[in-house]
Image (cartoon, rainbow, N blue to C red):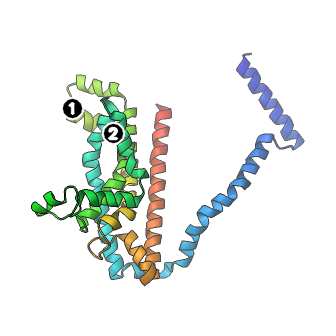
Amino acid sequence: MGTNEAAETIRIRVGQARHAQGASTPRQWIGIGLFWSAVPMILFLILPLLALIWRADLADIGIHLTQPVARRAIFLSLWTSATATLLTVLFGTPLALLMARRRFPLRRALDTVIDLPTVLPPAVAGLALLMAFGRRGMLGQSLSVAGLEIAFTSLAVILAQLFVASPYYIRAAIGGFSRSEVELEEAATLDGADNRQVFRFVTVPLARASLLGGLVMTWARALGDFGATILFAGNYPGRTQTMPLAIYIGFELDLDVALALSVVLMATAFGILLLVKWLLGRTDEGNQQG
């Protein structure tokens, strides 16, 4: 009998003896202690969400969402966040592939810059965008000469969402591309596939779960942005007032509409997080089976 088998036999016998005696193991007592120690934090995280649902009039939530201010905010949020997510995929995918597959000078610095918007205070992000693209910003005069005004327009909403949300997709895509098996791509190349075919039929399918997870997280972050948007785009109903901004105004003007929008955003965020966790769980299962 090997050492591992002997140790396992001892553990089984000890467990059987304790079970026969009706005694709890130290590990069980530790687990019970950890659970009750965690209860205050669990309650703190759950109670505000339950209070939001309790205070909102769920029976009339549909009526509140059809109010003009809510309809405009929902429509604007959906199309701007979708546009920001699409731009992230178009321009963030090449960047993620570059970071995952190439080594070059200042790569670590660029890697830090990619993550920076996720830790910057939203107000700083909005002010930075204003200083870059505003009327008096770094590129403001050149844009004005070209007849393009960005600040306090719907385009500013999209750029604010793109700035704060794109790192989530890029980071997930870097991880997905890094874990892809390069040997399969090389095999496809030897079989006659060109670079575009290899990327489409080999690289992307291998990193699909990570890409989808990053995609939905980016869309959720764009949908919920407040600080960068209000500083760079303002809060103009029908033009730059997204759902978070409508909630901010509705807190003073129409609390029922603000609560209805809050419940919608909370439910959307909850569903998105569940989807991401499911996708990541499938990736882990696939890796274990592989």
User: Which residue is nearer to you in this view: 290 or 273?
Assistant: 273
> Badge 2, how many Cα within 10 Å: few under 14, some, many 20+?
few
The residue that mark 2 highlights is: 110
Residue at image coords 73%, 47%:
31
Regarding residue 168, the answer to whether it shows in the image is: no
Which of the two residues, 189 or 257, is positioned nearer the viewer here? 257
Estimate the x, y position of residue 155 in percent, counting from the top left: 23, 63
In the image, taking residue 167 as reference, residue 193 lies left or right, namely: left
From the image, which quarter does the N terminus lie in?
Answer: top right
Residue type for callout 2: Leu
Report x, y in % for residue 38: 68, 54
Residue identified by numbered label 1: 195
Give the residue displayed 47% in from the left and 65% down from the top: 267
Question: What kind of element bears circle 2?
Answer: helix
Crowding at mark 1 (Cα within 10 Å: few <14, some 14-19, many 20+): few
Earlier sequence position, callout 1 versus callout 2? 2
Q: Residue furthest top?
A: 1
Q: Work out whether 198 lies above or below 140.
A: above
Front residue of 72/230: it is 230
Residue 225 sits in quarter: bottom left
* Percent coordinates x, y for residue 77 in the rendering: 33, 67
* Residue in the foreground of this view, choosing between 211 and 18: 211
